[in-house]
Image (cartoon, rainbow, N blue to C red):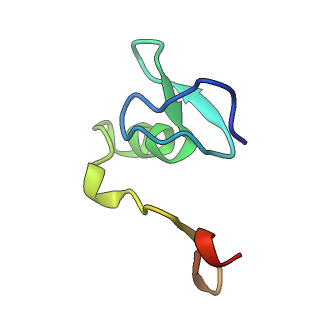
Amino acid sequence: MDKQGLVCSNCGGTNTTLWRRNAEGEPVCNACGLYYKLHNVQRPPTMKKDGQLQTRYGLMSLTTQ
C-alpha cells in the first residue's frame, strides 16, 4: 500500500502494507514500527531490504515480477 506522500521517518521507505506512527506521531512503515515496539530502539538502516520482498520461500526481487 503506497499512500500518497507518506515516507517512513526512520528508513525512508514509501511502500508498506501498513503505516504506523512513532512516539513523536510521525509516520513509520510497518517493519520499523514493529521493530521499535519489540526492541524499544529504532530499526537500523542496514536491515532495510531495497527492492526485495521476503516471502516464506525466500527472497523475490521486485524488478523481476
Would you say 5 lies left or right of 44 here? Answer: right
The residue depicted at 26 percent of the width and 58 percent of the height is 46
Quadrant for the C terminus in the image: bottom right
Determine the image quadrant of residue 40: top left
> Could you tell me residue 8's position as x and y percent?
46, 32
Determine the image quadrant of residue 49: bottom left
Q: Is residue 15 above or below residue 6?
A: below
**Furthest residue to the bottom?**
57
**Furthest residue to the front?**
63
Asked whether residue 29 is in view, the answer is yes
Asked whether residue 54 is in view, the answer is no
Q: Is residue 46 above or below residue 5?
A: below
Quadrant for the N terminus in the image: top right
> Could you tell me residue 25's position as x and y percent?
48, 13
Determine the image quadrant of residue 6: top right
Q: Is residue 46 above or below residue 24?
A: below
> Could you tell me residue 50's position as x and y percent?
43, 61
Of residue 34 and residue 65, the one placed in the foreground of this image is 65
> Could you tell me residue 28's position as x and y percent?
49, 31
Of residue 9 and residue 4, the one placed in the foreground of this image is 4
The residue depicted at 40 percent of the width and 28 percent of the height is 9
Would you say 36 lies left or right of 55 here? Answer: left
Of residue 56 and residue 46, the one placed in the foreground of this image is 46
Would you say 58 lies left or right of 35 here? Answer: right
Q: How many marks?
A: 0
Would you say 25 lies left or right of 61 here? Answer: left
The residue depicted at 34 percent of the width and 59 percent of the height is 47
